[in-house]
Each structure stands twice: as C-alpha cells, then as structure tokens.
Image (cartoon, rainbow, N blue to C red):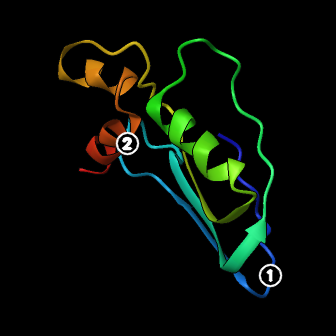
Amino acid sequence: MKTNPTPPIPVQGYLWMGRNIGIKDQSLDFGVLAAAHPCSAAAVFTRSNLPGAPVIVGREHAAKGTLQAIVVNSKCANVCASGPQKRSKYNPRWSCQLQQE
C-alpha cells in the first residue's frame, strides 16, 4: 500500500480520520469525514439490484439534501447474506445497527 508522506491540510469546520479497525488486513478500512454543521449534499450509489443495508440507509439520508458526516468502510461486503443477517434485505436499519455492535 502506498502512503502519502505529506500530512493532510486541516480545513476549518471539518474533521476526518482513517484507521484500521480489523475488518480484514492491516490496511486502512474505516474512515469518517465530519462537518461542524450540516452541509448541502449529493451522492452517487451502486445501481445493483441487491444493495447492502448501508446503501439503502445512505440513500435515505442523502435524499434529504444535507449531511453532517460520512462514514466509509472497505473490505466488508454485507449483501446477499445468509443466516440471521438475511433480515437486512427487509430491515436495513436493523442491519446497520448490527454492523455497529
């Protein structure tokens, strides 16, 4: 993995972080960009017929036209799950809550 030797330049009113939280390997797999106040927002999502629960909930939040934070994870697919996670197709908020636990 390539790293940027130049640290990010702070932007007043915004905070961000990226770190490894152990989803898979040692690379960065979790990030947050947060604003001090709600901001105008637009988003682009997958066109898949089987989007994961975070995509469904993210679409709902972005449709409001304002966001205050964006959370990104990588190396973690949660679509077409079997077992108890299968409920995520029918209850995306339950699946997002499960991801937090």
Instruction: Count neighbours of disc 2 (C-alpha within 10 A) and say few if under 14, some if 14 to 19, many if 20 or more.
Output: some
Up-down relation of residue 63 to residue 6 (above or below): above
Identity of the residue drawn at 71% across and 18% down? 47
Provide the residue designation for mark 1.
Answer: 11
Identity of the residue drawn at 33% across and 36% down? 95
Provide the residue designation for mark 2.
Answer: 93
Q: Earlier in the sequence, mark 1 or mark 2?
A: 1
Which quadrant would residue 49 be assigned to in this image? top right
- Image position, residue 88 (x, y; %): 34, 27
Up-down relation of residue 2 to residue 9 (above or below): above
- Image position, residue 97 (x, y; %): 30, 47
Callout 2, which amino acid? Answer: Arg
Which quadrant would residue 5 be assigned to in this image? bottom right
Identity of the residue drawn at 69% across and 75% down? 38
Q: Would residue 51 be visible to someone looking at this image?
A: yes
Distance Cα–Cα, label 1 vs label 2 = 32 Å
Identity of the residue drawn at 64% across and 15% down? 48
